[in-house]
Amino acid sequence: MKPLALLFLLIIATAATTPIPINSPILYSRGGSSDDGNMTNSIEASPSASSPITNKDTIPPVNATKRTRRVRHRKKKIFSPASNAIEEVVKEEVTTETAEVKEEVPTESEEVKEEEPTEIKDIIEEDVASSNTKEDDNFVFKGTDDTRSPTPTPTPLPLSLSVRPNPITTSLMTYNLAELPLQPHTISRILKQKNLLKSSFLFLSACETENLKPRRTEGSRSVNFRTQCITTTCEKNYTPLAIHSIGGVQGLLLVKDELLANITSVHVHDVACGIGNVVHNKGGIGVWVSVDVGGVRKSILFVCCHLAAHEKNVEDRNGDFWRIVEELEAGGPRFKKKPRKPKTQEQRTGIKLFDDVDHVFWCGDLNYRLECSRSLIEEKLFGWEQLDDDIIPSAIDYESILKHDQLRNVMRKGDAFVGLREGRIQFPPTYKFDKSTELSSGRRRKRKTPFFSPKTLNYDSSHKRRVPSYTDRILFKPSPTNNVNVKLYDWIEGEKRSDHRPVVATFEIQD
């Protein structure tokens, strides 16, 4: 009996350790059994006896899907290509079993979806349908067979609601210092009095900052002017783009910090117009700047100059203008088509330089005078009239004074400054005053316009008794679309050091 018992135990042990052949019909499934019912291999850990499995304790379908993928992955590694039929049967059974699990235990997303109100669901479906503007509801990703719903494209804003860039504002100042040092905070008073520190660009120019005495270093008056300009503007978030001087002519171009990133190029060129076109007592400075506004590149030319003096030298002033134009055409950058340098008097129109840029602003002591007697000017400025049994100062007719202006007549004839215009002048002549004299203005009775008297306007009281004139001017190039608006054109009252008065202007450039 003992040998038989040992033999029986050996047979049982041998049968238990025998490997399953590859072609065996036993299938691996989640808790399932083979068709013959002889053996069952489960991938799940069997639960303990103290916690029986019910429908509520079934493993969630997410874990079931993950385990199904593992089984499928193992099957692909185990079976050879010759067993395609068996592999397909395995996939079908696993897919069917996963679907049954999902039917038995609904997921949390399905429960929430069932509880969603129908009204909210209808609203969402209507919004999605209205936002999809394409004709095809489905599209296929390139290189795949995946078909998905396209992402709805945002509807562009109407033109009235789209963001437009702010217009560019440009302010200019010209001041002939008459070789006198500036008082402290002079530039600050000038810029703040007319509210110029809000402009996008500031172009500050001065003439006769120094005399023509030979010196090895720059004079203190030029340094003082430049220092006051930079100190005052940097406190208001300005950055200098160009600082240049030629003799006694100074020019500074500054830009707001918020517009600094849009500056693409800056170029400076100077022209001497003094004795023999060499001496720097007269001349001009040109500053080109290119700015990108709203995706559109605009080019602007700023010019400051000091032309020939004395009332009779009209032709010399015209010649200085043409020399500055020709030299700037030859030495300036080319934003558009390169212009030819004029060779004859008939070809010198200045339009070639001005057409190469979008906007031009020209300022300085142009030295054009009023060709009339001083008594006529004083009568227009200090006249009196009868009104309601009272004698009051008469209204100043500036147009009647400007009829005698040399610059207006030169521009009308086309002898110089062709293509440029000037804002409306509503202020007294800015030259020539007695140096270090205070200017003050009064108020007319029953009128809101200022009136002046010989005591408040201290024009030249020397033996020469020069005729008051508009020597300090600011001109601009008009646009074909009239998008350059003159917001300010005025003089600065109260600056008594020089025999000139500062002149300022503000322009707005619309897109």
Image (cartoon, helix red, strand yellow):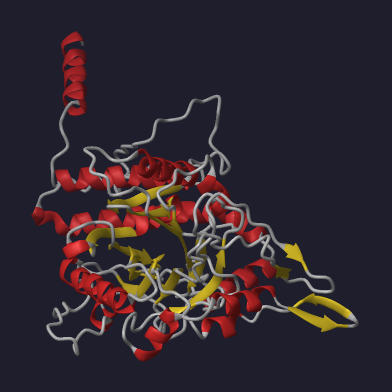
x and y, in percent, of residue 331 in the image: 17, 66
Give me the residue at 90% from left, 82% from top: 389
Looking at the image, can residue 28 be seen? Answer: no
Location of the C terminus by quadrant is: bottom left
Q: Is residue 166 left or right of residue 116?
A: left
Q: Vertically, is 287 above or below 422?
A: above
x and y, in percent, of residue 171 in the image: 48, 62
x and y, in percent, of residue 311 in the image: 39, 74
Q: Is residue 41 left or right of residue 439?
A: left
Give me the residue at 35% from left, 42% from top: 67
Looking at the image, can residue 463 be seen? Answer: yes
The residue positioned farthest toward the right in the image shown: 389
Give me the residue at 40% from left, 69% from top: 367
The residue positioned farthest toward the top in the image shown: 2
Q: Vertically, is 487 above or below 36?
A: below
Give me the residue at 15% from left, 11% from top: 3
